[in-house]
Image (cartoon, rainbow, N blue to C red):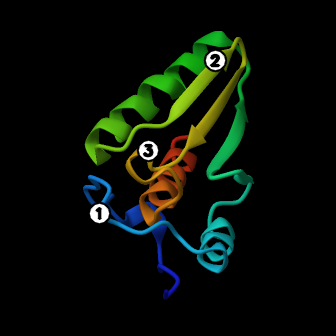
Amino acid sequence: MDQPRNLAQMRCVPCEGGVPRLEPDDIWRHLQQVPGWELAGNKIRKQYEFRDFVGAMKFVNAMAEVAEQQAHHPDFAVHYDRVDVTIWTHAIGGLSQNDFVLAAQIDGLYP
């Protein structure tokens, strides 16, 4: 699979389970484009830090808007001044290009 040029400018492709999971080599190539994200089994995750709870919640609200626009929704947990985000393509039980597109767009929200 060719490496995408700019994940943050791409759109998630609707997935009802009809796309194959990314192969390990493709996963590693995509991870290089989203610094700080790490592989966690068949998911990717990242932790964001903020000055306080209000900053964390502003980020979560912005992330929710992007997720709705992309129709691809991350799991997340708020811990006062930290937000843990986990992404994978639920319909295939693994990683697709959509996960890395969303990760790049979420990174773009971080101040």
Residue under label 1, please give it. 18
Residue 16, position in %: x, y?
A: 26, 52
Three-letter code for the amino acid on which mark 3 is drawn: His
Badge 2 crowding class, 10 Å Cα cut-off, few under 14, some 14 to 19, many 20 or more, is some
Question: Residue 75 at what x, y percent from top left?
Answer: 53, 31
Give the structural element (helix, strand or loop) at label 3. helix
Q: Residue at x 72, y 36 (%)?
A: 47
State the residue position of label 3.
90
Q: Secondary structure at mark 1?
A: loop
Q: Is residue 46 above or below residue 22?
A: above
Judging depth in this view, the residue of 92 and 85 nearest the camera is 92
Q: Is residue 14 above or below residue 1?
A: above
Q: Which residue is mark 2?
A: 78
Quarter of the C terminus within the rendering: top right
Q: Residue at x 72, y 17 (%)?
A: 81
Report how far apart the C-alphas of labels 1 and 3 lie in the structure: 12 Å
Q: Position of residue 29 (x, y in %)?
A: 64, 77
Q: Tell me if 58 is positioned left or right of 17 in this view.
A: right
Disc marking residue 28: none
Q: In which quarter of the view is residue 31 placed?
A: bottom right
The amino acid pointed to by label 1 is Gly
Q: 39 or 7, which lies in front?
A: 39
Q: Measure the alpha-carbon separation of dots 1 and 2.
A: 32 Å
- Mark 1 Cα shell of 10 Å, populated few (<14), some (14-19), many (≥20): few
Q: Could you classify mark 3 by the number of other residues whose Cα lies within 10 Å: few (under 14), some (14-19), or many (20 or more)?
A: some
Circles 3 and 2: CB atoms closer than 8 Å? no
Sequence-first tag of 1 and 2:
1
Depth order, front residue of 87/81: 87
Q: Nearer the viewer, residue 75 or 19?
A: 19
**Residue 108 shows in this picture:** yes
Q: Residue at x 43, y 44 (%)?
A: 90
Number of numbered discs overlaid on the protein picture: 3
